[in-house]
Image (spheres, rainbow, N blue to C red):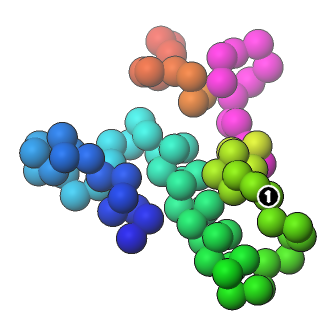
Amino acid sequence: QALAEMVTSDDRDTGSMYPPLNTIRDVSAHIAAKVAARAYKLKIATHLPQPEDLESYVRNLMVDPGYPGEPPMHSLSSPPAL
């Protein structure tokens, strides 16, 4: 359900069943926040108390696979030139 929420009408109009790959960080954060919300609802979450904004909390925990001095990967609209 969380993945389906990230598919836009434009994605569907182009025949895509999934969000574009360049939105993978946003999609991953959204799905992780939904999983965490479910864990809190079921009272099986281990990080207490529950953060007010789960998606922001998840984003702060995400690793940025770039190198020092390079812009963060999530800020690039296209891959850097080699």
Q: Secondary structure under badge 1?
A: loop
**Residue 72 in view:** yes
Q: Is residue 72 left or right of residue 57?
A: left
**Residue 62 in view:** no
Q: Residue furthest front?
A: 52
Q: Is residue 82 magenta?
A: no
Q: Tell me: residue 15, above or below residue 70.
A: below
Q: Which residues are magenta?
A: 61-72
Q: Tell me: residue 41, above or below residue 14.
A: below
Q: Tell me: residue 36, above or below residue 56.
A: below
At which x and y percent is residue 11? 21, 45
Q: Quadrant of residue 25?
A: top right
Which of the image's four quarters has the N terminus? bottom left
Q: Tell me: residue 58, above or below residue 36.
A: above
Majority secondary structure of magenta residues? loop
Q: Quadrant of residue 4?
A: bottom left
Amino acid marked by disc 1: Pro
What residue does disc 1 label?
51
Q: Residue furthest right?
A: 48
Q: Is residue 76 left or right of residue 7?
A: right
Front-most of residues 80 and 27:
27
At which x and y percent is residue 56? 69, 45
Q: Residue at x 51, y 44 (%)?
A: 26
Q: Is residue 70 magenta?
A: yes
At which x and y percent is residue 79? 47, 22
* Mark 1 Cα shell of 10 Å, populated few (<14), some (14-19), many (≥20): few
Q: Residue at x 41, y 36 (%)?
A: 22
Q: Residue at x 57, y 30 (%)?
A: 74
